[in-house]
């Protein structure tokens, strides 16, 4: 089958099937062979790898994955793409396409059944309307993962990689960096897609920590503290945590924890590292 990274081949297959792009599914197909090579390289795909692809579209990235990986499972929500994928992937015996919503699949069972529970790689040009839910689902359900290499909006990639005290730093940075080490492998302009998105994109690789980077007694409490401090970004950490409806500590308990953590009374949440949020959660958890 012809390389769909070549725009001419993509147009030909779209015309043949009279394919109509569905905006609601975030369909922007890749048409740039350099970007496709970069994704494969960033994810470090080898013949040892089992790869889960989310949203194969017409199979452009899937073809590259089939060439480099041992086995590929691709989950696509749009049933109109299934006959197209049968044609574009017909030359490969190491791929399975599943017509389903990725958020409705039990991925732990899939990894158990198809890869004996061994860690997998996830690669995707993600539908932008559900980037964060997909990534958090992968992390919070503790799917066995080596890395997750995804095309996302540039602005989202910047937030995932942001460090304390910068404008992009927030709950998403901390959630991602709790589980994985982010690395932006490429910036990708709109003209690499069909149709062109309105925003710039980036390929980000998230390499999972196989042993937790920090230890926290109550993970859920730590994430509530994080959310509360970024919900009220302009407020001090003390006021942000004290005003939060999700938390019910007294002002004195919060102030004591802040001081014991070696922070100043009027510190802002946006300057705290993940370790400091974990420290606060550990100090506050006996008061719950
Ligand atoms: N991988 C292809 C490429 O790079 O050209 C297509 C990428 S396109 C940005 C996103 C794909 O995800 C579309 O094919 C879309 O139909 C699919 N998709 C959207 N929501 C989905 C969901 N909830 N589960 C599975 N696939 C989904």
Image: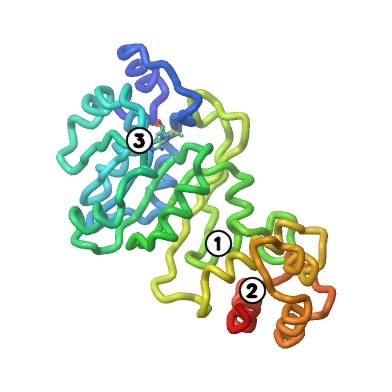
- Comes first in the chain, label 3 or label 2: 3
Ligand 1 position by quadrant: top left
**In the displayed structure, does residue 157 sit left or right of residue 168?**
left
Circle 2 residues within 10 Å: few <14, some 14–19, many ≥20: many
Residue beneath disc 1: 175
Q: CA distance from mark 1 to mark 2?
A: 11 Å
- Asked if residue 176 is positioned above or below residue 211 in the image, the reply reads above
SS under mark 3: loop
Q: Mark 1 or mark 3, which is nearer to you? A: 1
Q: Residue furthest right?
A: 266
SS under mark 2: helix
Q: Which label is found at residue 277?
A: 2
On the image, the x and y values in percent for residue 237 come to 77, 69
Q: Residue at x 53, y 37 (%)?
A: 129
Q: Which label is found at residue 56?
A: 3
Residue 83 figure quarter: top left
Colour mapping: rainbow
């Amino acid at each position: 089958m012809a390389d769909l990274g070549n725009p001419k081949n993509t147009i030909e297959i779209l015309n043949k099937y009279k394919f109509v792009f569905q905006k609601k599914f975030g369909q922007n197909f890749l048409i740039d062979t350099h970007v496709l090579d970069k994704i494969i390289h960033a994810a470090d795909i080898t013949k040892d790898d089992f790869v889960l692809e989310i949203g194969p579209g017409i199979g452009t990235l899937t073809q590259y994955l089939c060439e480099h990986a041992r086995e590929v499972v691709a989950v696509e929500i749009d049933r109109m793409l299934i006959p197209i994928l049968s044609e574009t992937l017909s030359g490969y015996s190491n791929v399975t396409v599943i017509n389903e919503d990725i958020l409705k699949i039990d991925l732990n069972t899939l990894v158990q059944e198809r890869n004996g529970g061994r860690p997998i790689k996830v690669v995707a040009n993600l539908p932008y309307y559900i980037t964060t839910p997909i990534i958090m689902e992968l992390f919070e359900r503790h799917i066995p993962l080596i890395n997750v290499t995804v095309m996302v909006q540039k602005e989202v990639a910047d937030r995932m990689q942001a460090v304390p005290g910068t404008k992009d730093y927030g709950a998403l940075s901390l959630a991602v960096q709790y589980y994985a080490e982010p690395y932006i492998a490429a910036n990708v302009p709109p003209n690499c897609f069909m149709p062109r998105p309105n925003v710039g994109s980036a390929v980000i690789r998230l390499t999972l920590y196989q042993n937790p980077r920090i230890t926290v007694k109550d993970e859920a409490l730590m994430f509530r503290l994080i959310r509360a401090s970024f919900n009220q970004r302009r407020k001090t950490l003390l006021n942000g945590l004290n005003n939060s409806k999700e938390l019910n500590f007294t002002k004195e308990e919060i102030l004591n924890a802040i001081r014991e953590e070696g922070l100043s009374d009027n510190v802002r949440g946006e300057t705290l590292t993940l370790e400091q949020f974990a420290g606060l959660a550990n100090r506050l958890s006996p008061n719950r």
